[in-house]
Amino acid sequence: MKNLTNPCNTVILIEDEEDVREAARLTLELEGYSVHTYSSADKALPHISEVLTGIVVSDVRMPGTDGLELLQKIISIDSELPVILVTGHGDIEMALQAVRHGAWDFIEKPVPPDRLIDEVSRAIKSRQLELENRALRQQLDDKQQLDNQIIGSCPAMVALRNQVRNIADADVDILIHGETGTGKELLASSLHQFSKRADKEFVALNCGALPESVIESELFGHEAGAFTGANKRRIGKIEFAQGGTLFLDELESMPMHLQIRMLRVLQERKLERLGGNTSIPVDIRVIAATKCDLLEAASRGEFREDLYYRLNVATLHIPPLRERADDIPLLFRAFVLASATKFGRQEPELNPQHFDLLQQQEWRGNVRELQHEAERLVLGISTLFSQFTPAAAFCQEQSTLPEQLASYERKLLSEALQKSGGKVQEAAELLGIPRKKLYLRMQKFDLHKEQFYPTESA
């Protein structure tokens, strides 16, 4: 079998008429495509798989397996593999039906070279994006890989991952420092997951999210009758984390008198519940996180210096997003994929102009803010990308007249579908074209009516 997996410019061309097949092959090869020709679908099928980094162009009417049968077989192999059908004038209705059942598009004979090149180019780009996204999804699904949890290729993030690998399995308490939204809890969770305590509980508590009257009971638990309303014994977060990891976020917010009690737990690995006299041994690892300089806070009398030094066996620093702007495209693509899965929406097309705009922002909320922007884009409510209509973004990458006309056509289709809320019949009436023709154009430009349904947030 020929190697059809590299580079991403492969075209499998199936045509039973030799003259037509050779003319199409020459046209595509002059454009730089790697063309593999076959005189029948049966000969081509063994070379088609889900790892094919290319597309299929096939005649419809052929001896043996025809183009429609081939389409169904390809869909069963990989439903995202673009298949362009070449059809005679009398087969237009058949081709329309094929498009509705998964064909990328169809071209009517005789095939104009420019049309063939244009359709193949678009299909190849779509295939490349799909394979890139598929690879990224596979990486994100592999939870055993630290690189897929702490994402980033800048030197600071590479160094951070190395630190995690070095200390994750060392049973020492850790202090994490980072601005709001940089991913401190994610880092703590990764330290737990790659430690020998991974099969036990990871218990998180935000010290700044609870009132002082509640946090003590949340941490240490209480005995029945310890205070008004304490009708029964309650196990606190520290005790619940037995054998595992306790994560204390916004440590700087912990009340001073609780800092003293926490210091004793760290030193003696024992606690007493509120209202109790029994000393309870605890086997935990403590990971604390802060967004401020605790030594400065200690100098102002706002934090216990001895608690800082007790926790500061190992300190990890997470850089803010503004210091790792080169990681923004990778992070954003990962968030878009995750958001599309979460909301059951179509993944929006991203291009260099999107990433340039993202890298120009301040991102005061850091990674969390970037994640929320990805969610807004997937939901279709992003204001940051309002300047990029699907057609405008596409047009910025293209320059030829046919490509610009196609971009304008895509823009008109999108606007009509947006106005109709995804109702195809209503959009077709707005455009003044038959519904069947609109379906065909939607298929060509990878538009789906679900993209234009009104959202709850809208």
Image (cartoon, rainbow, N blue to C red):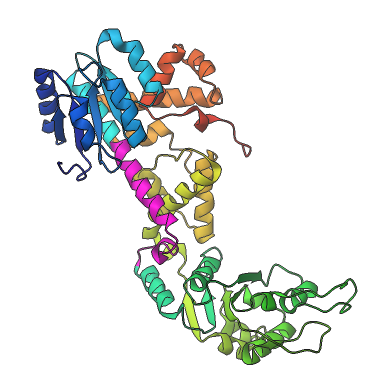
Q: Position of residue 249 (x, y in %)?
A: 61, 72
Residue 399 at least partly seen: no
The count of marks equals 0
Q: Position of residue 406 (x, y in %)?
A: 33, 25
Q: Position of residue 434 (x, y in %)?
A: 44, 11
In the image, is 239 to the left or to the right of 416?
Answer: right
Position of 278 relative to 354 (above/below): below
Work out which quarter of the rendered image holds the N terminus and state it: top left
Along the viewing direction, whichever of 105 and 381 lies nearer the viewer? 105
The residue sitting at the top extreme is 90
Work out which quarter of the rendered image holds the C terminus and state it: top right
Along the viewing direction, whichever of 394 and 455 lies nearer the viewer? 455
The residue sitting at the front extreme is 64
Indicate the quadrant where residue 53 lies. top left
Residue at horizontal 51%, vertical 84%?
A: 171
The span shown in magenta is: 125-154
Residue at horizontal 63%, vertical 70%?
A: 204
Position of 186 relative to 428 (above/below): below
Residue at horizontal 35%, vertical 41%?
A: 130
Q: Position of residue 183 (x, y in %)?
A: 52, 65
The dominant secondary structure in magenta is helix
Position of 358 relative to 38 (above/below): below
Along the viewing direction, whichever of 396 and 286 lies nearer the viewer? 286
In the rendered image, residue 169 lying in the magenta stretch gets the answer: no
In the image, is 242 to the left or to the right of 419?
Answer: right
In the rendered image, residue 126 lying in the magenta stretch gets the answer: yes
Position of 265 relative to 436 (above/below): below
